[in-house]
């Protein structure tokens, strides 16, 4: 079971961005995929989760309206996107697979570093 | 929303010694508590779920205990590869919430 994320990104404020997380080694459509933010030197923040089988998506109240989570089950890939980045979006972003029964996460992707700077 | 508080924020321990990390929930989470290890430059890794069940491949020196609002992660004899940040996470209530982390440093 493996989650492989897209590479680091450097963007300017106001730009859009879509990062990806590709699953392999398991039935991608049958497990929820979560996105987690880690700002520099800080803890983990759960952003939202998607079920690739039917694209059912839930967001943390803190991130609702700030990001969009989507998935393409035909290529076993989940996405996290921004329409207009801010400097405060600078962080490491991880995807992680939810357990089949409970809402803990294993395994995790390697992370995608997003840097937003003018 | 539940608040998860980890203490201490940092812990200095000598190799071979025991480390005890605490995680407190602002309201009961039953045993729906997970622990993760995060080494520098790496993604988190699941250590414990259900408050006390070790994940696949996790050494027996890691143990979790507690229920309700008070939880403990114990590393019985610290190895060099155990120096890392440890995060707790509750999954009893929506949304899932992480604690702020405890950094275990070499003394």
Image (tube, coloured by chain):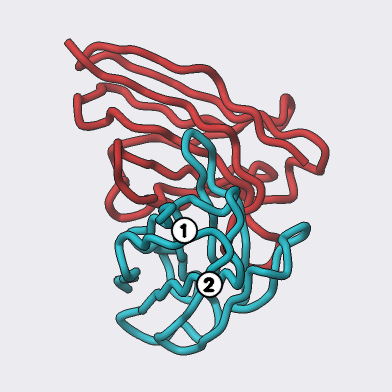
Is residue B100 shown left or right of residue A79? left
Task: Rate crowding at label 2 as few (under 14), some (14 to 19) or many (20 or more) other CA atoms within 10 Å.
Answer: some
Label at residue A85: none
Q: Nearer the viewer, residue B93 or B37?
A: B37
Q: Given the image, what chain letter belongs to the residue carrying mark 1?
A: B
**B94 relative to A94, above or below:** below
Is residue A66 shown left or right of residue A77? left
Is residue B79 shown left or right of residue B90? right
Q: Nearer the viewer, residue A104 or A64?
A: A104
Q: Chain A is shown in which shade? A: red
Q: Are dots 1 and 2 in contact, CB under 8 Å?
A: no
Q: Nearer the viewer, residue B17 or A100?
A: B17
**Which one is earlier in the sequence, the residue at label 1 or at label 2?**
2
Q: Quadrant of the C terminus of chain A?
A: top left
Give the image quarter of residue A54.
Answer: top right
| x then y, percent, for residue B6 | 34, 69
Q: Nearer the viewer, mark 1 or mark 2?
A: 2
Query: Which residue is found at the position 63% from the left and 48% from the top?
Result: A97
Q: Which residue is mark 2?
A: B18
Q: Given the image, what chain letter belongs to the residue carrying mark 2?
A: B
Query: Which residue is found at the position 62% from the left and 67% from the top?
Result: B48
| x then y, percent, for residue B17 | 53, 68
- CA separation in Å, label 1 and label 2: 15 Å
**A40 relative to A49, above or below:** above
**B64 relative to B89, above or below:** below
Query: Which residue is found at the position 63% from the left and 69% from the top?
Result: B62
| x then y, percent, for residue A106 | 65, 52
Chain identifier, cyan in the render: B
Task: Rate crowding at label 1 as few (under 14), some (14 to 19) or many (20 or more) other CA atoms within 10 Å.
Answer: many
Q: Which residue is mark 1?
A: B86
């Amino acid at each position: 079971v493996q989650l492989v994320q897209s590479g680091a990104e450097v963007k300017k404020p106001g730009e859009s961005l879509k990062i990806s997380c590709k699953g392999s080694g398991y039935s991608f459509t049958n497990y929820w995929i979560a996105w987690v933010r880690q700002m520099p030197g800080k803890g983990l923040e759960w952003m939202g989760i998607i079920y690739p089988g039917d694209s059912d998506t839930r967001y943390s109240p803190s991130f609702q309206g700030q990001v969009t989570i989507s998935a393409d089950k035909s290529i076993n890939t989940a996405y996290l996107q921004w329409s207009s980045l801010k400097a405060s979006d600078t962080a490491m972003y991880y995807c992680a697979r939810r357990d089949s029964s409970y809402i803990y996460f294993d395994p995790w992707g390697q992370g995608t570093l997003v840097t937003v700077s003018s | 929303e539940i608040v998860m508080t980890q203490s201490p924020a940092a812990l200095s321990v000598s190799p071979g010694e025991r480390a005890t990390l605490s995680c407190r929930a602002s309201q009961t989470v039953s045993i729906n508590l997970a622990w993760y290890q995060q080494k520098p430059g790496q993604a988190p890794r699941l250590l414990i779920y259900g408050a006390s069940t070790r994940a696949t491949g996790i050494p027996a020196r890691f143990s979790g205990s507690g229920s309700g609002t008070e939880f403990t992660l114990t590393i019985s004899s610290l190895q060099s590869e155990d120096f890392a940040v440890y995060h707790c996470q509750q999954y009893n209530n929506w949304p899932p919430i992480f604690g702020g982390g405890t950094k275990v440093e070499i003394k």
